[in-house]
Image (cartoon, rainbow, N blue to C red):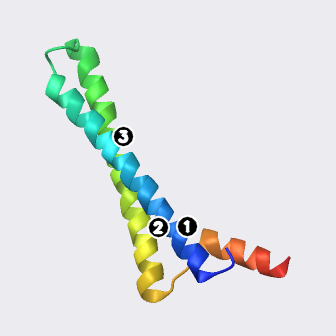
Amino acid sequence: MSSKLEIREKLASDVARAKERYRQAQAEFKALVDDFPSRLPPTDGALVVRKAGQTEQEARKALTIAVKRLSDFATNGIVPEDLQERTTRSASA
């Protein structure tokens, strides 16, 4: 990343993708819970719901991290390490 604008756009894009992933995981989890246990066999159904809950939790965590990275950059000018490395590499190239 070579400019602050590019870094901000990348971080904002990461937030948008994480938000969409979380919304999808939320919707899938809600749909499963709404159908449980009526349509799913009890043992398999519980496992499917548990996995969907874990997926939702992971998506929420990813969203939280993405928002924090953007917030840290916007408020304190902190460039995440993975983006600093790109900046350093492109500046020295």
Image depth: mark 2 or mark 3 in front = 2
Is residue 80 among what the camera can see? no
Which quadrant would residue 54 be assigned to in this image?
A: top left
Q: Which amino acid is tagged 3?
A: Thr
Label 3 near label 1: C-beta < 8 Å?
no
Q: Residue at x 36, y 62 (%)?
A: 64
Are dots 2 and 3 in contact, CB under 8 Å?
A: no
Q: Residues within 10 Å of mark 3 (few under 14, many from 20)?
A: some
Residue 69 horizontal side relative to residue 27, left or right: right
Q: Is residue 38 above or below residue 80?
A: above
Q: Residue at x 58, y 74 (%)?
A: 7
Per the rendering, the mark at residue 72 is none
Q: Residues within 10 Å of mark 1 (few under 14, many from 20)?
A: some
Find the distance from the CA under tag 1 to the CA under tag 2: 5 Å
Numbered disc total: 3
At horizontal 33% and vertical 41% (from top left) the residue drawn is: 25
Q: Secondary structure at mark 3?
A: helix
**Mark seen at residue 12:** 2
Q: Label 2 near label 1: C-beta < 8 Å?
A: yes
Question: Callout 1, which amino acid?
Answer: Lys
Q: Is residue 39 above or below residue 55?
A: above
Q: Secondary structure at mark 2?
A: helix
Percent position of residue 28, x then y: 29, 34
Q: CA distance from mark 1 to mark 3?
A: 24 Å
Q: Is residue 40 above or below residue 12?
A: above
